[in-house]
Amino acid sequence: GEAMAGELILIVEDHDKNRKLVRDVLQVTGYRTAESETAEDGLRLARELRPALILMDIQLPGMNGIEALGALRADPATRHIPVVMVTALDPSEERVKGLEAGADDFLTKPINQPELLARVRSLLRVKTLHDTVQSQAAELAELNRTLTRRVEAQVAELERLS
Ligand code: MN
């Protein structure tokens, strides 16, 4: 089946119709979804649920999507989560701000379903690679610690015998 099926995707979108459309497309494809209507709520859910990907509307009531992206990037708990910024028509200025704030990709409204799924798949592949590299680095660090302990034990044993 779908390689990345089951991954949790957080949708931050204040318009009910858009949020439902995105949710339905993702769920039918096999992803799990979480939703929020505000950036503040989205930030809380991102920290609590650690989604594999976030779809962030830019125009939101209260804190906007660009500010929320900045907050995600400033928090070590959410820094590495890929974020797709969802923009209205004529997004050129928003794109620049989004790129500066650390956006991984953009989607333009009205949302095109195949494009949405293509971007989600592409970013989840990158995240999987990142996670693999992270876990291999952790394994190497553990191996290194084990080797260091063995060498130290052997040195101590040699000193005891000499
Ligand atoms: Mn909006």
Image (spheres, rainbow, N blue to C red):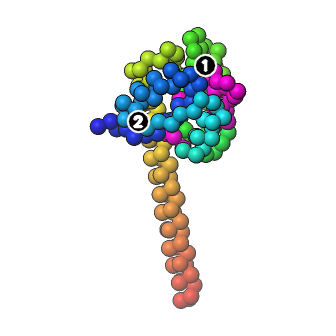
Name the residue nearer the viewer: 138 or 44. Answer: 44
Q: How many marks?
A: 2
User: Which three-letter amino acid code belongs to the residue tagged 1?
Assistant: Arg
Residue 15, quarter of picture: top right
Q: Kindly report which numbered mark, 1 or 2, lies closer to the viewer in this rendering.
A: 2
Residue that badge 1 annotates: 95
User: Which three-letter amino acid code belongs to the residue tagged 2?
Assistant: Tyr
The reply to whether residue 42 is in sight is yes
Q: Would residue 148 be counted in the magenta stretch?
A: no
Classify the position of the N terminus by image quarter.
Answer: top left
Q: Position of residue 127 (x, y in %)?
A: 47, 39
Which residue sits at x=41%, y=20%?
Answer: 113
Classify the position of the C terminus by image quarter.
Answer: bottom right
Q: Would residue 53 be counted in the magenta stretch?
A: yes
Q: Is residue 66 left or right of residue 118?
A: right
Q: Residue furthest top?
A: 90
Look at the numbered disc 2 and say if its residue's Cβ is closer than 8 Å to ligand 1: no
Q: Is residue 28 left or right of residue 58?
A: left
Q: Position of residue 152 (x, y in %)?
A: 55, 75
Which residue sits at x=39%, y=21%?
Answer: 114
Query: Element type at marker 2?
Result: loop
Q: Give, as a single range, the part of the protein colored magenta.
A: 50-72
Residues at marks 1 and 2 touching, judged by CB atoms closer than 8 Å: no
Q: Is residue 38 left or right of residue 133?
A: right
Task: Please rate how many residues cluster around mark 2, counting C-alpha atoms within 10 Å: few if below 14, some from 14 to 19, many from 20.
Answer: some
Name the residue nearer the viewer: 59 or 114. Answer: 59
Q: Residue furthest front?
A: 16
Q: Position of residue 50 (x, y in %)?
A: 54, 44
Within the displayed image, which quadrant is ligand 1 positioned in?
top right
Query: Element type at marker 1?
Result: helix
Residue that badge 2 annotates: 31
